[in-house]
Amino acid sequence: MLPINFAAIAGLIIDDIVLPTGETRMGVPGGSGTHSVWGMRIWSDGVGLIASYGADCPAEILTAFDEAGIALHRAGANPQPTPRCWQVFEFNQHRTEIFRTSEADFYRLQPVLSDIPTEWQAATGFHLLHEVEDVPDFARHLRAGGVSCLLAEPPPTDFTPEHLDAFAAFLPLVDVFSPNWEESAHLLGIDNPDAIVARFLEMGVPVVALRMGEAGSLVAAGQKRWRIPAVSVSVVDVTGAGNSYCGGFLVGYAQTGDPLMGGRYGAVSASFTIEQFGLPVIDRSTAERARDRLRRAMGSG
Ligand SMILES: Nc1ncnc2c1ncn2[C@@H]1O[C@H](COP(=O)(O)OP(=O)(O)O)[C@@H](O)[C@H]1O
Ligand SMILES: [Mg+2]
């Protein structure tokens, strides 16, 4: 396995997908970190996920990581059985997630600081999907280990006004913060995207990438603002779009130092995620197809 350049820390979920036609896709890798690392892998070798999973984790899941060329590091807490969910879809893309294993255990047994392999601390970038209260410890630890680019994407449930102080505490410690529009409006009590990104910048984070679904994203740094349109593809399932966008953003921003390019890489990664149920296939044509979509994104942005 190559040295790790980009990594995410998050829960792994085995998804059993039920399509609106009644067709099923059983036992596919899912969870926020999984979608993130697939979004990174579109652009980079040396990608890895740190996740908790049980000894019962099916070989097909581990093989899917191998086939995609993504390292999977098992965290110390081993939930038994491995977290597993039904993902039930309707024709209008509405998704219902039903935990088949303990949902409380899924959140309780997330990776901790000591689960980060020492060698991975030489990575360029980390995607933090932790609850807001846990971000500062991870950010300080990874920064001390030499990681240069940290992107935080806290879970949707944290975006409530009671958590505002915790947001203020971690924002100055990361390089990029990517919230979603609706969740930010709920957290801040402001609806206007320009006002939202301005507020987060004031709270001390250098770059904000506000995700706005099919309206694309609004990237902000200092006085600069960039509107990044979604890359046009035929949309099948938007699950993981935001996680994949963040994985792509992290690679693009770390490699170019340009927030605009971060947003474009993110939009391209998301486009690969939403054109099928489950994860995009990573093969020899992926890098070229990604470059092609990036050229298209540069033309329209
Ligand atoms: N319905 C959609 N049509 C086209 N692109 C989409 C759609 N939903 C998401 N995307 C793409 O994925 C990116 C991230 O998705 P978004 O919905 O903003 O994240 P999340 O759902 O995690 O909040 C968007 O900026 C856009 O590029
Ligand atoms: Mg969305």
Image (cartoon, rainbow, N blue to C red):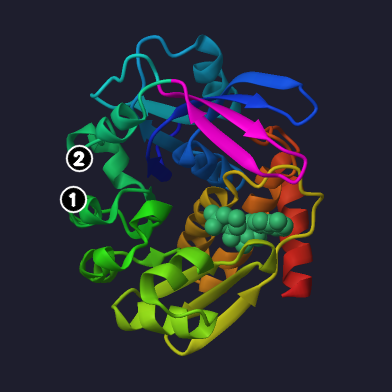
Mark number, residue 113: 2
Quarter of the displayed picture in which ligand 1 can be seen: bottom right
- Residue 22 appears in view: yes
- Residue neighbourhood size for the residue with mark 2, other residues' Cα within 10 Å, grouped as few (<14), some (14–19), many (≥20): few
Q: In this view, does 246 lie to the left or right of 10?
A: right
Circle 1: residue type: His
**Disc 1 target residue:** 141
Q: In which quarter of the image is the C terminus?
A: bottom right
Where does the magenta region start and end?
A: 83-100
Kindly indicate the quadrant of the structure image that contains residue 203.
bottom left
Residue at 43% over, 30% down: 12
In the rendered view, tell whether residue 172 sits above or below residue 108: below
Magenta stretch holds residue 96: yes
Element type at marker 1?
helix
How much space separates mark 2 and mark 1, taking CA atoms? 8 Å
Asked if the residue at tag 1 contacts the one at tag 2, i.e. Cβ–Cβ closer than 8 Å, the answer is: yes
For the point 40% across and 9% down, which residue is it? Answer: 56
Q: Type of residue at label 2?
A: Leu
Vertical order, 214 against 123 (above or below) = below
Labels in figure, total = 2
Residue 282 is situated, as x and y percent measured from the top left of the image, at 66, 34
Q: Is 26 included in the stretch rendered in magenta? A: no
* Residue 212 location (% of width, % of height): 60, 66
> What quarter of the picture does the N terminus occupy?
top left
Lower sequence index among marks 2 and 1: 2
Q: Nearer the viewer, residue 62 or 237?
A: 237
Vertical relation: 253 (above or below) 14: below
On the picture, is 275 further left or further right than 191?
right
Q: Quadrant of residue 111?
A: top left
Say whether residue 190 is left or right of residue 167: right
